Amino acid sequence: MKTKKPNAELVWKQLDDLLVPRLHLAPIDRAAYCYLLRHTRLEGKLQLRFSATWLGRGICLGPDAARQALHRLIDHQVLRLLERSNAGHVAEVRLPEEILADLPPKVVPPDQPQIINRRLRWPLPGVNLETEDFMRTYALRHAIHAREAGRCFYCLRVVTPSMKCLDHVVPRAQSRNNSYRNLVSSCHDCNMQKGPCRADDFLRSLFRERKLTDRELAGRLRALDALAAGKLMPAMPCAVARPKSPALPASSLRAQPGTRPDPQIPL
């Protein structure tokens, strides 16, 4: 897919001056992003099929280190992973200005006023949930992760920011559906293992592998039905120009690694 080639000088200024300090990109992650950017958007391409071995060779890293850098870039929403298979990855590489436009506003102390660019504000209330594309902005993607309360929708384990990603219940290649009814927060392992199979079949495979108990399987299948029925609506983000402090998760949602929630309550 061909796109208009961006101004390379402007892209690099936005990368070094704005994106890297805002996302706190490590040198390895920056090198991986620059290499992918060089082979996609700077050549007028939106997407790229590649392997971790190819990426590692290009930035002088081993495949495992390159794969970890990819996971971090996906978590930062720098890349949009469209396909993952043994044949390689298909990813959409985003420009710095596109990434910055999706980021929520910085938290600014009251005694340090700041004019916030309107392009960086979160989506306004009143959005139609049924027609909204939840892959469109960082805030909307974060709303899906927040709905699952820090756990993988499929295996129920606690996931850290570097472990989680968004998964399409009905594969994107089949549905092209990015609604809240078709997106869940999952760990990278479940995202890779599920592939193109049906979500209910994948849950049963986790049960056969003893990663879910019979009660947990029943609870996950009920949650899957509730998701399809539109009963698991995420909380929509609001436009907050100057919040006083970051929002803290409710203590009731905190869970220690290795523990599991009540399987009868859909997450």
Image: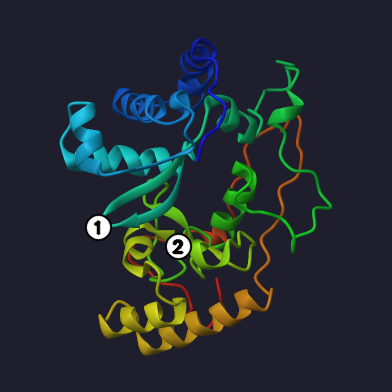
The amino acid type of the residue labelled 1 equals Asn
Q: Nearer the viewer, residue 63 or 163?
A: 63
Q: Is residue 156 above or below residue 80?
A: below
Q: Nearer the viewer, residue 149 or 102?
A: 102
Q: Secondary structure at mark 1?
A: loop
The residue identified by callout 1 is 86
Q: Nearer the viewer, residue 212 or 70?
A: 70
Residue, far front: 2
Q: Quadrant of the C terminus?
A: bottom right
Regarding residue 233, the answer to whether it shows in the image is yes
Q: Residue at x 46, y 73 (%)?
A: 261
Residue 151 disc label: 2
Q: Residue at x 67, y 79 (%)?
A: 229
Q: Residue at x 38, y 71 (%)?
A: 155
**Contact flag, marks 1 and 2 (Cβ < 8 Å):** no
Indicate the quadrant where residue 256 lies.
bottom left
